[in-house]
Structure formats: C-alpha cells, structure tokens
Image: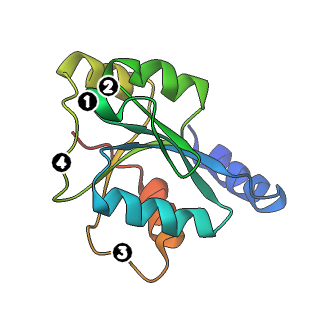
Amino acid sequence: MSPATSIWQRLLARWRPDRCRSLIMLGIDSGCHRWHGALSEGSAFRIRVFIDDEPWNHRTRIGDAPVHYPSELLALLQKHRACALLQVEDNARPAIDATMLDEIARLKIPLLTLPAQLPRDPAAVLRQMLTSRAPER
C-alpha cells in the first residue's frame, strides 16, 4: 500500500460513520468477561463469539455472544468479518494449532493480547492496538 493510499484511506475513515467492529475472544475466564462488559458499554466494538474447548461450555452464551469450539474459529472469523482475535494476558485460552494460526495470519487478522487489568478506556486501547496491527502468536 502506498503512503498516498494510506492517507486517503485515513481521510475516508474520518468521514464514514463509525461502524461496530466485530471481535472474537479466545477463552472465557474472568478477564474475558471484564473486557466483554467494558466493550459492550460502548458502540465501537462487539465481541461476537467466545472460543473455549470445554464441552460443557459449548453453545452457552456470555451476554449476547455464544461460546464455540476452537475448530470453528476460521469459519467464525469469516462469518462475523472479525477485525481481530483477542486473548487476555494471564488467562487460560483454548489450544489453537499452528496451522490455524498460519491461516489466521494469512487472512491478516491480528491476534491481540489485551492487558489483564482493564484500562480506563478499553475501546481506545483496543483501537490503538489495531492501528499498530502487530500480529502476535
């Protein structure tokens, strides 16, 4: 992408109304719940799906977001047009194999690690992480 295109895209983004951006969360621990609650208060981001590998959690809901198995992750990323895959530091997360991580990287969907301590403005922190778009593993 050329610098001119990047500037043009940034200008267009300012004129477009902010759309709710879809996210998928790895894990269902307390840190994930805190982030879900904080992001649900605003209108910029929505956690659409939680991923957990425990069978007794499958198809339950956290707020308005269902819990799915890790094997469904790629299809869910595409279905919800997720802008990022999230995990919370120091929280348990389901096992995601290397092949799936490679496919997620190929789709250019960043895997972001959120701080365990909820910041004052969670949406701003997430927005900053997305603009830097440093994919993790």
Q: Which residue is mark 1?
A: 53
Q: How far is disc 4 from disc 3 in space, using C-alphas?
A: 17 Å
Residue displayed at 41% across by 19% down: 72
Give the camera-side residue of 28 and 117. 28
Q: Which residue is mark 2?
A: 70
Give the camera-side residue of 123 and 91. 91
Q: Secondary structure at mark 2?
A: helix
Residue displayed at 41% across by 60% down: 129
Q: How far is disc 3 from disc 1 in space, using C-alphas?
A: 24 Å
Amino acid type, callout 3 = Leu
Lower sequence index among marks 2 and 3: 2
Which disc number belongs to residue 92?
Answer: 4
At which x and y percent is residue 89? Answer: 21, 59
Q: Which residue is mark 3?
A: 118
Asked whether the beta carbons under mark 4 and mark 1 sit within 8 Å of each other, the answer is no
Q: How far is disc 4 from disc 1 in space, using C-alphas?
A: 11 Å
Lower sequence index among marks 2 and 1: 1
Vertical side of 12 occupied by 72: above or below: above
Q: How far is disc 2 from disc 1 in space, using C-alphas?
A: 6 Å
Q: Secondary structure at mark 1?
A: loop
Vertical side of 57 occupied by 122: above or below: below
